[in-house]
Amino acid sequence: MIQIITKRELSVYLGSPVAYVFLIAFLLLSGILTFTLGNFFERNEASLGIFFNWMPWLLLFLVPAIGMRLWSEEKRLGTIEFLLTLPITPLQAILGKFIASWIFLIVVILGSFPMVITVNLLGSPDNGVILAGYIGCFFLAGTYLAIVCLASALTKNQVIAFIVSVMVCLLLNLIGFSPITDLLSRWLSPPMIEGIANFSVLSHFDGFQRGILDSRDVIYFVSVIACSLYINNLVIKNTRAG
């Protein structure tokens, strides 16, 4: 049943012109941030480091914009009642929607592959580091998406789901952002700051950017995804019971 829901959601994405608008917007913005604002050519280095530096902030808005409709639209149209009367569990519906959206996000991110070709034409980059960076982007997008799914399940208003998702994901970014940790160092001890920073997506995404596939970083992203989807399941079960 998960496969059925996944195919249903993917068909919605692929059949909607809005999805292609998101794809084009992502490619344009990532290109501008990397080559123009990131001064790619002035750096004289064959690397996509600046591209990956922007990903936590670009995906911060892209993912909520894509995922905000997942449950809130079902609630607004009243189709959630029909969906939950089908012979599927709420968890199967949640996983189907999540997997479909994650696949779409991965396709969108892979749309930037011409950048990989570009840096290889201009020099000799470490493609292992680039691959690790893309894997980190996939986990980052999945983490944001799981949070968006939960926010969308809590309201029938897509705008509210978008705003709540952005705020929560922004918080997860900022608690590991250098200016914030430097500010906290005035009042908190280094171990406390390190403990807080460990909850940041930036702290765990950094290893992927440097080409390091650390199991602790993978466990962090998987844990946030699993926790968000678990709470999402509780919310949908409560909707079904109501």
Image: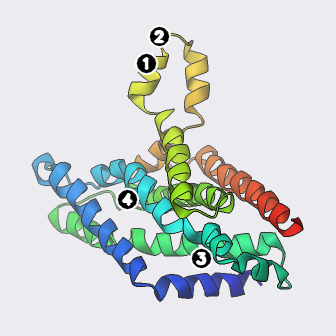
Residue identified by numbered label 3: 100
Residue 155 is labelled as: none
Q: Residues within 10 Å of mark 3 (few under 14, many from 20)?
A: many
Residue type of the residue flagged with mark 2? Arg
Q: Nearer the viewer, mark 3 or mark 4?
A: 3
Closest to the observer: 71 or 178?
71
User: Disc 3 and disc 4: Cα gap in Å?
Assistant: 25 Å
Give SS at disc 1.
helix
Quadrant of the rendered structure where residue 20 is? bottom left
Instruction: Write the residue at 81% across / 58% down.
Output: 234
User: Disc 2 and disc 4: Cα gap in Å?
Assistant: 36 Å
Residue identified by numbered label 1: 183
Residue identified by numbered label 4: 130
Q: Is the Cβ of the residue at disc 2 closer than 8 Å to that at disc 1? A: yes
Q: Residues within 10 Å of mark 4 (few under 14, many from 20)?
A: many
Give SS at disc 2.
loop
Q: Earlier in the sequence, mark 3 or mark 4?
A: 3
Residue type of the residue flagged with mark 3? Ala
Q: Is the Cβ of the residue at disc 3 closer than 8 Å to that at disc 4? A: no
State the residue lying farthest toward the right: 241
Q: Quadrant of the C terminus?
A: bottom right
Residue identified by numbered label 2: 186
Q: Is residue 49 visible?
A: yes
Give SS at disc 4.
helix
Q: Nearer the viewer, mark 1 or mark 4?
A: 1
Please give left or right for residue 86 compared with residue 168 in the image: right
Q: Earlier in the sequence, mark 1 or mark 4?
A: 4
Q: Residues within 10 Å of mark 2 (few under 14, many from 20)?
A: few
Residue type of the residue flagged with mark 1? Leu
Instruction: Write the residue at 47% across / 86% down.
Output: 14
Q: Is residue 140 above or below residue 201?
A: below
Quadrant of the rendered structure where residue 100 is? bottom right
